[in-house]
Amino acid sequence: MKLLRIKGVIHLTGISKSSIYALSNAGKFPAPLKLSEKTTAWVESEVLDWIQSKIEERKQVNGRLNVTQQQQGVPHE
């Protein structure tokens, strides 16, 4: 198991530090582990799972858009 500090999470996700903490506080992103008084880290596999879930959401949305476009007669690219 690998732990990521905030810079690693930012690098993997492309999301700002404040957004990561806001999403985490809202329960929409994996919660960090408190390693010490001033140190937090995220479990890499949890962050990667979150990224994968976003990819799956996009696939579902794109699939619905393609069906809607077909129903409306919009040519498929």
Image (spheres, helix red, strand yellow):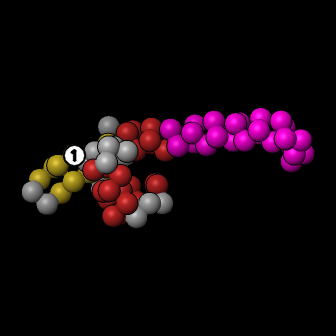
Seen as rendered, the residue at the extreme left is 37
Q: Secondary structure at mark 1?
A: strand
The residue lying at 36 percent from left, 56 percent from top is 20
Q: Quadrant of residue 65?
A: top right
Segment tinted magenta in the rendering: 53-77
Q: Amino acid at mark 1?
A: Leu
Query: Relative to the observer, which residue lies in front, 35 or 61?
Result: 61
The residue lying at 48 percent from left, 60 percent from top is 14
Question: At which x and y percent is residue 1?
Answer: 32, 37
Question: At which x and y percent is residue 12?
Answer: 46, 54
Q: Which residue is mark 1?
A: 33
Q: Quadrant of residue 16?
A: bottom left
Compared with 27, 37 (above or below) is: below
Question: At which x and y percent is residue 72?
Answer: 84, 41
Relative horizontal placement of residue 59, taking residue 38 as reference (left or right): right
Number of numbered discs on residues: 1
Relative horizontal placement of residue 59, taking residue 44 as reference (left or right): right
Compared with 73, 21 (above or below) is: below
